[in-house]
Image (cartoon, rainbow, N blue to C red):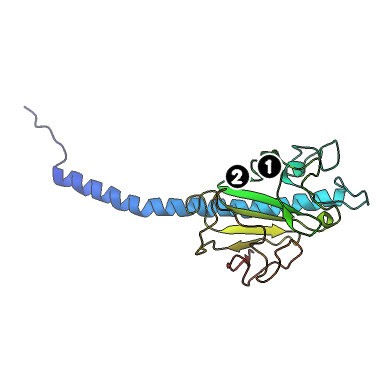
């Protein structure tokens, strides 16, 4: 009778131990790679948003004060999801992906990051987007004169540590800034703990969109925001 061959208990334990060692090395690397990919995508998206804003302003498609100078727009307007402020028509063709027309609670979530756009009111304070995207009636009080020169957008992880770590900012200057997002008061994460509109502006300022951005220095939120190359 032929003897059946198989693994001994010691051999099985050795194989399990090897698999555990490989997993302990591979899983953190996979998580790190995903975080880096999400953060790189967020930076690229902010640069696309900056280009879209430049196109919108240069085209003059939004001109609520009828002075011939174009104004910057909200996500819903840039993506062609809603009519532009003070008008009965949409931007066609859209200057931003139609995925940014999916605005909920003033934000858009994509690739593990939350994005929020701000436009200025008459005092220069940042105003977020209305439910559903844009603000066709301009009920939020966006100032036409200041919206010709000012806007700001933040991007932060939808789940800190799982989808990303750093927080990013961009405005009309076109420079992307990042912070390590490791505040003692709690990191920015999801819609429950977003950055304030004044987060990336220089410490001691009023925090309006007209203030100086805190590039490489202390910001109002206590973080050091550095320019992303």
Of the pair 122 and 217, the residue shown nearer to us: 122
Residue 200 in the figure: left or right of residue 157:
right
* Residue that appears at 61% across and 66% down: 225
Residue 18 in the figure: left or right of residue 167:
left
SS at circle 1: helix
State which quarter of the image contains the N terminus: top left
Residue 56 in the figure: left or right of residue 185:
right
Q: Position of residue 76 (x, y in %)?
A: 73, 41
Q: Position of residue 166 (x, y in %)?
A: 55, 59
Q: Earlier in the sequence, mark 2 or mark 1?
A: 1
Local crowd size for mark 1, using a 10 Å CA cut-off: few (<14), some (14–19), many (≥20): many
Residue 110 - label: 2
Numbered disc total: 2
* Residue that appears at 67% across and 65% down: 201
C-alpha distance separating marks 2 and 1: 9 Å
Residue 100 - label: 1
State which quarter of the image contains the C terminus: bottom right
Q: Is residue 9 above or below residue 197?
A: above
Q: Position of residue 55 (x, y in %)?
A: 81, 50
Q: Contact, CB < 8 Å: mark 2 with mark 1?
A: yes
């Amino acid at each position: 009778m032929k003897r059946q061959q198989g693994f001994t208990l010691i051999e099985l334990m050795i194989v399990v131990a090897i698999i555990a060692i490989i997993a302990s090395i591979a899983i953190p690397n996979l998580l790190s790679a995903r975080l880096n990919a999400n953060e790189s995508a967020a930076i690229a998206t902010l640069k696309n948003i900056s280009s879209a804003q430049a196109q919108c302003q240069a085209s003059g498609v939004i001109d609520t004060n009828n002075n011939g100078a174009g104004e910057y727009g909200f996500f819903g307007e840039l993506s062609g999801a809603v009519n532009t402020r003070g008008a009965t028509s949409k931007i066609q063709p859209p200057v931003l992906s139609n995925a940014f027309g999916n605005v909920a609670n003033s934000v858009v979530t994509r690739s593990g990051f939350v994005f929020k756009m701000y436009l200025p009111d008459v005092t220069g304070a940042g105003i977020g987007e209305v439910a559903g995207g844009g603000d066709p009636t301009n009920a939020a009080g966006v100032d036409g004169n200041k919206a010709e020169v000012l806007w700001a957008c933040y991007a932060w992880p939808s789940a800190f540590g799982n989808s990303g770590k750093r927080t990013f900012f961009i405005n009309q200057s076109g420079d992307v800034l990042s912070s390590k997002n490791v505040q003692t008061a709690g990191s920015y994460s999801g819609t429950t703990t977003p950055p304030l509109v004044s987060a990336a502006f220089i410490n001691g300022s009023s925090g309006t969109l007209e203030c100086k951005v805190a590039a490489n220095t202390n910001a109002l939120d206590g973080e050091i925001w550095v320019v992303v190359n």
